[in-house]
Image (spheres, rainbow, N blue to C red):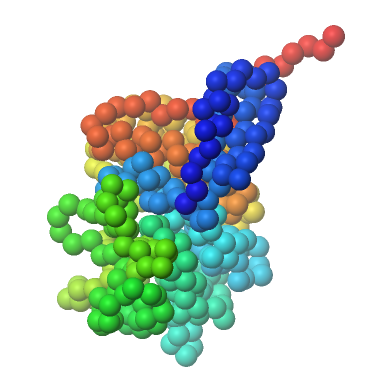
Amino acid sequence: MKIWSPLIATLLLLSVTSAQVYEDDNFIIDIVEDDNDPEIVNVKPVIDGPLPCNGYPEYRKLPVNQAFYLGANNAGSHVFSNDCQVKQQNDIPQMLKDGVRFLDINLCLNDEKQMVICSDHDSAISNTSFRNVLDDIFQFARDNVEQIFIVHLQSRGVHQPLDVKDVDKLLDETCKVHTELTDGTDEYVAFECPFIYKHEKGPWATMGELVNYNPDMAQWEGDGELVGVRSRIIFTHSDSVLHAPEYTSPYFTSTFWRALKADDISNLMGYLKKECRIPAGGIKVDAYSEATCSAETYTPEQIEELLFYKSACNLNDSPLNTFISVLSVDQYQKHLPYYKELESRVMESNYAKWNGEYQFIRPSYLVSIKPKMVRDEL
């Protein structure tokens, strides 16, 4: 990992009157003029891969269940051709590379009883196997250290839903292959996949603990490179996936959020206004509509309204034990810069609440929800 240059300190002291960009081998700094703050400084470290703890090493002590995860609804649906079926244009490796850390995947069984990507719009069955999807997911975990992401499985609107017991077997088979390809791992033990984190009873692990990130301690290194399993996957599933009451899964963690969705934004705002007043932990906001196949997505302005308006969640006046765990959207790439900025703001808030502090969530620099002033031309 590269170190920031001392040039940062110098640039922070500069007063600027127009947009400026400074660049060197270690980072890029944009200083942009803004109506509210004339000196907005955006520092972008240049690194090989994402920073530890999903890009937030400073929050490594935050429990995993109190972090924020940017989610992609119907991840993998790019394999379909019908606009009503395609909820994401990018494939899963690109999603993970872009910083998506919550993959909502809809699956079913085909006629050969293979697990495949399926459409929740019209029950269409793809030729993309879940095994291939898992290979991509485990490969990302091997190639990118100190990351945590959630894979949430569903069988919405399908004829043959998955069974958790069968999924566990496939997870174990896939994990064995990737564990044995990873340097620094012990001999594989069946149904003890080192890549998968399952939360049992008791306190949750922190982000740093889960990926063995502690800058105050010596890291386990081999030939100058990090070795062993250094990223973790959390698997969850919805009620649409079959799970016999008597069966205890070795790999699936119970969902740790309250899921809120609606067919239109006004209803979702109403649900959030009520739920955000209840101090009952994390909330998953499904900011998309299942009632239509429109290519339109929620705009950043609408997301701001959902989370910060008094007529909706009003996060800045919510209890300490109310926070946003997941924001799941369609076509995430349309507004990715905004989503990443929102992620940093919500992570800051979640960390403050975990520390018992009420902290006002800073406004977005990318979105204005105030009426624009129209000036008369001379």
View extreme (front): residue: 223
**Placement of the C terminus among the 4 image quadrants:** top right
User: Residue 298 occupies which quadrant of the picture?
Assistant: top right
Residue 208 appears in the rendering: no
| Residue 333 rendering spot, x and y as whole percentages | 60, 52
Residue occupying image coordinates x 23% and y 61%: 199
Residue 302 horizontal side relative to residue 277, left or right: right
User: Residue 12 occupies which quadrant of the picture?
Assistant: top right
- From the viewer's side, name the closer residue of 256 and 23: 23
- From the viewer's side, name the closer residue of 128 and 181: 181
Residue occupying image coordinates x 43% and y 57%: 102
Residue 97 horizontal side relative to residue 115, left or right: right
Does residue 178 sit above or below 224 in this rendering?
Answer: below
| Residue 218 rendering spot, x and y as whole percentages | 29, 55
Does residue 7 sit above or below 347 in this rendering?
Answer: above
View extreme (top): residue: 378
| Residue 41 rendering spot, x and y as whole percentages | 56, 29
Residue occupying image coordinates x 15% and y 59%: 201
Residue 268 horizontal side relative to residue 214, left or right: right
Residue 218 appears in the rendering: yes
- From the viewer's side, name the closer residue of 119 and 190: 190
Residue occupying image coordinates x 24% and y 34%: 355
View extreme (bottom): residue: 112
Does residue 14 sit above or below 174 in this rendering?
Answer: above
How many numbered markers are drawn? 0
| Residue 131 rendering spot, x and y as whole percentages | 46, 79
View extreme (left): residue: 202
